[in-house]
Image: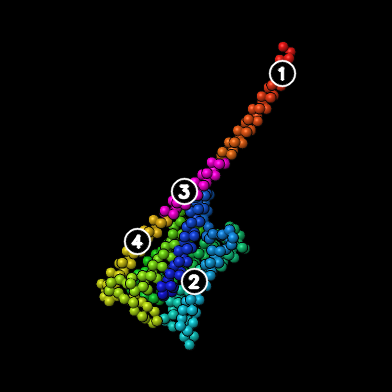
Amino acid sequence: MGTLVGHVAPGFGFFALGLWHLLNHIRLHALNPKYYTSMPWFPTSKLRYLELFLIMVGCSMSISMELFIGPSRHQPLDPDGTIPSYHLHNFEHSTISLTFFVYACFAIILDKFSPRKSQYGLTQLLGAAAFGQQLLLFHLHSADHKGVEGQYHLLLQVVIFLSLLTTLMGIGYPKSFLISFVRSISILFQGVWLMVMGFMLWTAEFMPKGCFMNLEEGHKVVRCGSHEALERARSLVNIEFSWYFVLVIICSMCLYLCLNKIYGERVEYQTLSKYEEQDEVEDVEAQKESKHFVDHMGKSFAPMDIER
C-alpha cells in the first residue's frame, strides 16, 4: 500500500462501495420513507451477490499485491522464515483486506443459511469487526506516525471510527435512515482520502515547501528539512482534509436532493394514478347503480300509468 497505486486502487474501491450504498439508501428511503429499513449490502437484479463478490475479488488482489507481487522476491519473508521490518506494513495492509474478505464471505453464507431475524445483526457485526480491525491496524501502524504521512493516517482514523460507530449503531437502529446515510458517506470519504493520500504523498510536484521524498528501506517516505516545514506541512494536510470534507458533504446533500426529487415524484405519481383509477372505478359503479335504480323505478311506475 505504500505507493501511489497502493492507495488509489483500494481508495477507489471504498469510494465506489460508499457511493453504491449512498445511492441505494437514498432510493430506498425516497420510495418508502415510512417503512424504510436499512440493508447491510445490496443485491443486484442479475447477480444477487455482485457487491460481495467484488469485495472478495478486490481483497484477494490487495493481498496478492502486498505479499507476493509487490515484494522484490515475490514473497514477504526472510530466508530464515521471519518477517523483515520493511515488510511489516505489507502484513498489516493484507490483514485489513483479509478481514473485509471474511466479512463478504460470511455475508453470503448468512444470506443463504441464517434465519432472517439474526442475519441483519450478524452481518452488521461482521462489518463492524472489519472496520474495527482497520482502525486498530492504522492506529498501531508500523509506518511513520509523526511525519506528513502520519498526519494523513491520523485523519483517516477519524473517518474509519465514524464508519465503525455508525455500523454498530445500525445494529440497534435498522430503521434509521440518518445512520445509514452517514455510514455511506464515511465509507465514500475513506475512499476519497485514500486516493488523495496516494497522489499527495507519492507525487513530487505535490510535496509541501521544505519537504522531499526520501528512499528508506526500499520505500519512498516524505521528509521535511526543518521542524517549521514539518508543522506547515501537517497544517496543510488538516486544511486539505477540511476542504475535502466540505466537498463530500455538499455532493452528498445534492445527491440526496436530486434522487429524493426523482423517486419522490415517481411515488407521488404512482399514488395519484392509484387514486384516479379508484375514482374511475367508483364512478362506473355509481353510474351502474344509478341506471339500475332508474330502470327499477320505470318498471314500478309503468302499471300505474296503464291503470290511469
Q: Report the amino acid beneath label 4.
A: Trp
| Foreground disc of the pair 4, 1 | 1
For residue 243, the mark is: 4
Q: In terms of depth relative to the viewer, which is nearer, 222 or 132? A: 222
Horizontal and vertical percent for residue 252? Answer: 42, 56
Q: Report the amino acid beneath label 2.
A: Ser
Per the image, the residue denoted by label 3 is: 261
Q: Secondary structure at mark 2?
A: helix
CA–CA distance in space, label 3 to label 4: 27 Å
Q: Is residue 86 visible?
A: yes
Q: Residue shown at 49%/82% (left/top)?
A: 74
CA–CA distance in space, label 4 to label 1: 88 Å
Horizontal and vertical percent for residue 298? Answer: 69, 21
Q: Report the amino acid beneath label 3.
A: Lys
Q: Secondary structure at mark 4?
A: helix
Quadrant housing the C terminus: top right
For residue 97, the mark is: 2
Per the image, the residue denoted by label 1 is: 302
The range drawn in magenta is 253-274
Sequence-earlier tag: 3 or 1: 3
**What crowding class fits label 1: few (fewer than 14 Cα within 10 Å), some (14-19), or many (20 or more)?**
few
Q: Is residue 267 above or below residue 212?
A: above
Q: In terms of depth relative to the viewer, which is nearer, 173 or 156? A: 156
**What crowding class fits label 2: few (fewer than 14 Cα within 10 Å), some (14-19), or many (20 or more)?**
many
Sequence-earlier tag: 4 or 1: 4
